[in-house]
Image (cartoon, rainbow, N blue to C red):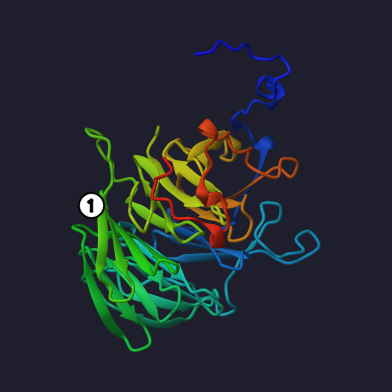
Amino acid sequence: MVDVKPRIADESMDKSKVWKLMEITDTAQCRSLKLGDSIRTAKISRLIYTNSGVAILALASNAVHLLWKWPRNERNSTGKATASVSPQLWQPPSGILMTNDTIDNSPDEAVHCFALSKNDSYVMSASGGKISLFNMMTFKTMTTFMPPPPAATFLAFHPQDNNIIAIGMDDSTIQIYNVRIDEVKSKLRGHSKKITGLAFSNVLNVLVSSGADAQVICVWNTDGWERQRSRFLQIPSGRPTSNILDTRVQFHQDQQHCLVVHETQIAIYDASKLEPSAPPITHATFSCDSQLIYASFLDATVCIFSASSLRLQCRILPASYLPQNISSNVHPVVVAAHPSEANQFALGLTDGSVYVMEPLESERKWGIPPPAENGSTSNMSTPPNGASSSDQPER
C-alpha cells in the first residue's frame, strides 16, 4: 500500500461538489396540489395517470371511479397534469358515475383493480363483483363479465392486443381472456394465493406475475402461456409481514428489468433470468423515464430513489404536503407517475384525498443522483434500444 496524501486542489475534496441528500421538510420546498372532490369517497385503492398525461383516474374503496382532467389555457398551455393548475373533477352531462359491480354491498372489503386501454378510451375495472368495461368519455358501462367466484384481483391489457386481458384471480389463477369472443384462452397456475401483480414485456414476450404468497415471482411465455421460471424473494428471516402491501411488479422502460415491490424491500430483477428499509413500504412505481422510483411509506414519507443504483435521492416528509391537523393514520397507499413528466407523481391516501407532487420550478427535479459507488454505473441508464441485459440485480 502506498501512502498518498490528498491534494488540496483535488476536485474530490471540493466541499461544494460533495453530494448531499435532498430533503424536503415544509411546503415552501415543493409544489403540491390537493385535487378537489365534490363526490365524497373512501380510501383511494387504485390510482393512474391517463396515457396522454392530461388526467388522473382513481378507484376508491367504495367502488366509485374519480376522473380529474386538466384544462388547456394560458396558465397550462399543454393541458397536461400539473401541480400549478387545479383540474376539474369530470363527469358527463348525464351525471352517471363509473361504479363497479360489488358483492353483498361491501365494496370496502373487496380487492379493487383496473387497467386503461392504450388510447385512454376504455377502463377495465373490478371491485369484488363482475369485471366492468367503461367508456371513459361517457362513463357508460359497455359490458360486464366473469361474475365471481373467483373474483378478479389484478388486470393487465396485452401490449399488442387490447382484446386480450390477463386477469389475476383470488383463487391464485391467472386467466387469459379474449374480450371480443368472450372466452378464456388459457388458465395459468403457479401461485398459492391471490394474484397481486401482473406486468407484460413486449420485448421479452413474457408476463410476470406476483401473488399474496409474497415470495414467488413467475415468468410466463406469452406465445404458449407456459411458465418459464419462478423465483422466491429474499424476505428477511423473522420479519413479520403486516399485509400492508401485496407484492407488485412493473417493467422498466427497457422492458427487460422488472421492479418488484414488497413492504420489506424494493428490488430490480433481470426478467429474462429472474436474478436478483425503515417503515413498511405501501407502494412504489417507476417515473415515466424509469430513472427514478417513487416509493411511499406507512409514516406518510415519500422517498425518491435513483433507479440505476436504488440509492436514496430525495426524501419528502409528510409536513411538506399534509395539513398540520390531519390524523397520524393518514398515509399514501398508491403512487402514480405522470406518463411524460418524469418529475411529477400523484399520491392516493387512506382518507380519500389525492395529491399531485412536483419539485419547485427553481429546482426542476428531485435532487441529483448520488455518485456511483466504485465508479460503477447501471446499464439501465441507456435508452431502451441500447439497453443490455446484465444478469446482475442492481441492489
Q: Which residue is mark 1?
A: 213
Q: In the rendered image of this protein, does residue 278 appear above or below residue 129?
A: above
Residue 236 percent location from the top left of the image: 27, 35
Residue 202 percent location from the top left of the image: 44, 69
Task: Locate residue 341 relative to residue 300 in the image: left or right.
Answer: right
Residue 64 percent location from the top left of the image: 44, 66
In the rendered picture of this protein, how many numbered marks are placed on residues? 1
Position of the C terminus by quadrant = top left
Q: Residue furthest right?
A: 74
Q: Quadrant of residue 383?
A: bottom right
Can residue 330 be seen here? The reply is no
Q: Quadrant of residue 164?
A: bottom left
Q: Nearer the viewer, residue 163 or 8?
A: 8
Task: Locate residue 146 relative to residue 157 in the image: left or right.
Answer: left
Residue for point 39% across, 34% down: 277
Q: In the rendered image of this protein, does residue 72 appear above or below residue 335?
A: below
Q: Nearer the viewer, residue 76 or 384?
A: 384
Q: In the rendered image of this protein, does residue 268 appear above or below residue 71?
A: above
Residue for point 59% across, 12% down: 4
Can residue 103 be seen here? The reply is yes
Q: Nearer the viewer, residue 158 or 279?
A: 158
Q: Residue furthest front?
A: 2
What's the amino acid at mark 1? Asp
Q: Secondary structure at mark 1?
A: loop
Q: Residues within 10 Å of mark 1 (few under 14, many from 20)?
A: some
Residue 233 percent location from the top left of the image: 28, 46
Task: Locate residue 221 relative to residue 88 in the image: left or right.
Answer: left
Q: Residue furthest left?
A: 192
